[in-house]
Every structure is written in structure tokens, then in C-alpha cells.
Image (cartoon, grey):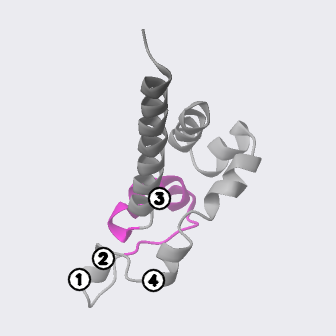
């Protein structure tokens, strides 16, 4: 039989895991090398251009803009206010599925 301590430990592990996956998703999303993965719909619509730049090769793979890292979770409150249909239209089915899992967790 599970004790209250066991349930508390399980809850803490689940909450920390959910937060860690959210942070990993958000950090991977802002890296230029993952741009076509997370914003493929915008490329197909022509709303976004290729991030490949001439010059510094590091900037092709890593986002060096510090302000981006300080506000990397700003999209979350707006996404939680949107309906599932709006999220699918704006960001795609994978983002809608991720938000659904996050909210259920």
C-alpha cells in the first residue's frame, strides 16, 4: 500500500519531469538548427525564410541572442488561451498534442 510520502515523492517526480520536458522543448525550439522542424508550416506558407546565414557558423546552430533565452516561455500563456483548432492552425498538430499532454499531466 502506498503511503502519503510515496505519493508525494511520485508527485514531485512527475511535476519536475513535466517542467524539464517543457524547458527542453522550449530551448530546442529557439535554436536555428531546429527551425524547420518547429516552424515547418511557416516555411511552407512563405511566412519565414531560411535561417542559414553566411559568416559565423556557430549562429547557424546555436541562438546567441541572450534576450531570447530570458523570454523563451512567453508563448505558453498565449497558447493556453487558444482553442485546440487555433493551435493546430498556428503551430501544428504536434504542438497541440504536446499542450494536451502537458495540461493532462
Q: Main secondary structure of the magenta part?
A: helix
On residue 60, which mark appears? 2
SS label for mark 3: helix
Q: Nearer the viewer, residue 53 or 38?
A: 38
Q: Which residue is mark 3?
A: 26
- Let me know if residue 30 is in the magenta part: no
Please give the residue where the numbered disc 4 appears in the rendered image.
66
- The single residue placed furthest to the top in the displayed view is 1
Q: Which residues are magenta?
A: 31-51
Q: Which residue is mark 1?
A: 57
**Element at label 2:** helix
N-term mark: 2 or 4: 2
x, y percentage for residue 47? 58, 66
* Separation of residues labelled 2 and 3 (CA atoms): 18 Å
Name the residue located 32 percent from the left edge and 74 percent from the top edge.
62
**Label whose residue precedes the other's in the sequence (3 or 4):** 3
N-terminal-most mark, 1 or 4:
1
Distance from Cα at disc 2 to Cα at disc 4: 16 Å
Residue drawn at x 63%, y 42% as measured from the top left: 88
Give me the residue at 61% from left, 36% from top.
Answer: 103
Of badges 2 and 3, the one in the foreground is: 3
88 left or right of 8 in image:
right
Secondary structure type for disc 1: loop
Q: Which quadrant is the N terminus positioned in?
A: top left
Mark-to-mark CA distance, 1 and 4: 18 Å
- Disc nearer the start of the sequence (2/3): 3
Amino acid at each position: 500500500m502506498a503511503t502519503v510520502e510515496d505519493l508525494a515523492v511520485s508527485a514531485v517526480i512527475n511535476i519536475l519531469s513535466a517542467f524539464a520536458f517543457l524547458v527542453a522543448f522550449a530551448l530546442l525550439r529557439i535554436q536555428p538548427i531546429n527551425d524547420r522542424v518547429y516552424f515547418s508550416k511557416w516555411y511552407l506558407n512563405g511566412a519565414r525564410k531560411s535561417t542559414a546565414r553566411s559568416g559565423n557558423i556557430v549562429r547557424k546552430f546555436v541562438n546567441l541572442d541572450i534576450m531570447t533565452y530570458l523570454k523563451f516561455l512567453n508563448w505558453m500563456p498565449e497558447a493556453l488561451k487558444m482553442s485546440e483548432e487555433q493551435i493546430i492552425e498556428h503551430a501544428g498538430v504536434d504542438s497541440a498534442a504536446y499542450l494536451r499532454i502537458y495540461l493532462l499531466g
